[in-house]
Image (tube, helix red, strand yellow):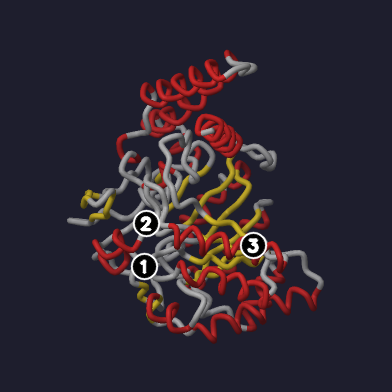
């Protein structure tokens, strides 16, 4: 039944937003944009359409941020650039580890050389995610321009082998295979690749920040029923993953209006951009750009930076407690609080009538407690 599906999805969003299963520190994560420099020019990357001069995050700003690490579980070093290009990247990892944080980063894989793999093992990096745009050289190299698929996969294989040979628990090595109209047919092949490389997980996220009309047309998720061919490719990949013992996580193709708090959960994490500005997430934290847009439901929408403070001027604890930042987070807190109240008033649903009434109550709660205006034209707010 559709209503049972809604209830199930709400409970899933509730568990995620409330931090169930997280460590004891109050915040789940900070995502740190260590650089906007990159050695690739991927077709869908916002860097291709901005005028910002490529730059690195200043070391003193990172040190200043580290005074807040005692509140954070995970320090994830990634933004709109290749993090391994930062000259003090390993110092950043080491400092976060000294403060008791798990660390991780996403990379295009080109710089995962032997020395890099040794540093990853030595510093006990928790997560290394390698981005893929396809499961073949023809597809991947065409989309991620400047990449070399064969070198990338060889680099991943070397990292996994070093982890095995040293008996290290970390890193958890993930392949991130972006779902698009160009790549969806290769998802089963990506499962085979993940199996061959012996990575810990294959994650298949959506192209959720389309910058061009081509990107918007190339996305394969929507509010409507998914394309049967796309669903078939995902089903084939999931069955194959089950048979081969590959852990796989595929993002949904059908969006929903039932999301309580988006995956990037501003109540539990935040983003620091390369200029040292604090934003709710990587999508709201891009440096201010004249005329920079993205697409939402076929329409071109303006994108601007949502900055609640700069580390160049204030301590992170001050910024987190700023009135405007607390007001922004209150949009999400109210949704969660009203949902909790609704659950408490409905301890047991005994029949179809009560289930339908619960569904109407859900709609009312969401309508009366919307997302912040800046989030309403972001696909993440609808489960992408």
Q: Which one is earlier in the sequence, the residue at label 1 or at label 3?
A: 1
Count residues near mark 3 (Cα–Cα under 10 Å), then give few for <14, some for 14-19, many for 20+.
some
**Quadrant assignment, res 13:** top right
Q: Which residue lies at the image location 41% right of the left edge and 64% below the top edge? A: 180
Question: Which residue in the protein does label 2 denote?
Answer: 275
Q: Which residue lies at the image location 65% right of the left edge and 65% below the top edge? A: 241
Q: Helix, strand, or loop for circle 1?
A: loop
Q: State yes or no: discs 1 and 3 in contact (Cβ < 8 Å).
A: no
Q: Helix, strand, or loop for circle 2?
A: loop
Question: Which residue in the protein does label 1 denote?
Answer: 55
Quadrant, the N terminus: top right
Q: Which one is earlier in the sequence, the residue at label 1 or at label 2?
A: 1
**Quadrant assignment, res 98:** bottom right
Count residues near mark 1 (Cα–Cα under 10 Å), then give few for <14, some for 14-19, many for 20+.
some
Q: Is residue 184 above or below residue 100?
A: below
Q: Is residue 171 above or below residue 276?
A: below
**Would residue 222 appear left or right of 300 to someone viewing this image?**
right
Q: State yes or no: discs 3 and 2 in contact (Cβ < 8 Å).
A: no
Q: Is residue 263 above or below residue 370?
A: below
Question: Which residue in the protein does label 3 denote?
Answer: 239
Q: Which residue lies at the image location 62% right of the left edge and 58% below the top edge? A: 103
Q: Helix, strand, or loop for circle 3?
A: helix
């Amino acid at each position: 039944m559709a209503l049972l599906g809604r209830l199930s999805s709400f409970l899933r969003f509730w568990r995620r937003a409330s931090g169930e299963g997280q460590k004891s520190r109050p915040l789940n994560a900070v995502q740190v944009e260590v650089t906007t420099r990159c050695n690739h020019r991927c077709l869908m990357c916002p860097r291709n359409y901005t005028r910002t001069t490529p730059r690195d995050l200043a070391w003193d700003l990172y040190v200043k941020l580290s005074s807040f690490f005692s509140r954070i579980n995970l320090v994830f070093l990634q933004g709109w650039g290749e993090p391994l290009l930062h000259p003090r990247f390993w110092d950043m990892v080491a400092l976060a580890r000294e403060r008791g944080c798990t660390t991780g980063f996403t990379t295009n894989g080109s710089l995962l050389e032997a020395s890099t793999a040794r540093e990853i093992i030595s510093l006990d990096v928790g997560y290394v995610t390698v981005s893929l745009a396809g499961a073949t050289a023809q597809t991947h190299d065409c989309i991620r321009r400047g990449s070399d698929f064969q070198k990338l996969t060889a680099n991943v294989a070397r990292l996994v082998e070093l982890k095995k040979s040293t008996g290290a628990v970390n890193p958890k090595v993930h392949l991130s295979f972006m779902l698009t109209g160009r790549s969806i047919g290769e998802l089963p092949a990506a499962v085979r690749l993940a199996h061959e490389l012996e990575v810990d997980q294959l994650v298949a996220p959506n192209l959720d920040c389309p910058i061009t009309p081509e990107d918007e047309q190339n996305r394969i998720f929507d509010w409507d029923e998914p394309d049967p061919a796309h669903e078939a490719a995902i089903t084939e990949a999931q069955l194959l993953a089950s048979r081969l013992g590959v852990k796989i996580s595929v993002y949904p193709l059908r969006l929903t209006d039932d999301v309580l708090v988006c995956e990037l959960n501003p109540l539990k994490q935040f983003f620091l951009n390369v200029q040292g500005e604090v934003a709710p997430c990587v999508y709201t934290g891009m440096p201010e750009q004249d005329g920079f847009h993205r697409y939402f439901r076929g329409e071109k929408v303006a994108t601007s930076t949502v900055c609640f403070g700069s580390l160049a001027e204030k301590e992170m604890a001050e910024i987190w407690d700023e009135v405007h930042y607390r007001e922004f987070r209150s949009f999400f807190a109210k949704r969660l609080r009203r949902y909790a109240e609704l659950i408490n008033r409905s301890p047991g649903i005994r029949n179809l009538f009560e289930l339908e009434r619960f569904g109407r109550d859900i709609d009312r709660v969401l309508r009366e407690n919307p997302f912040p205006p800046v989030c309403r034209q972001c696909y993440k707010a609808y489960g992408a």
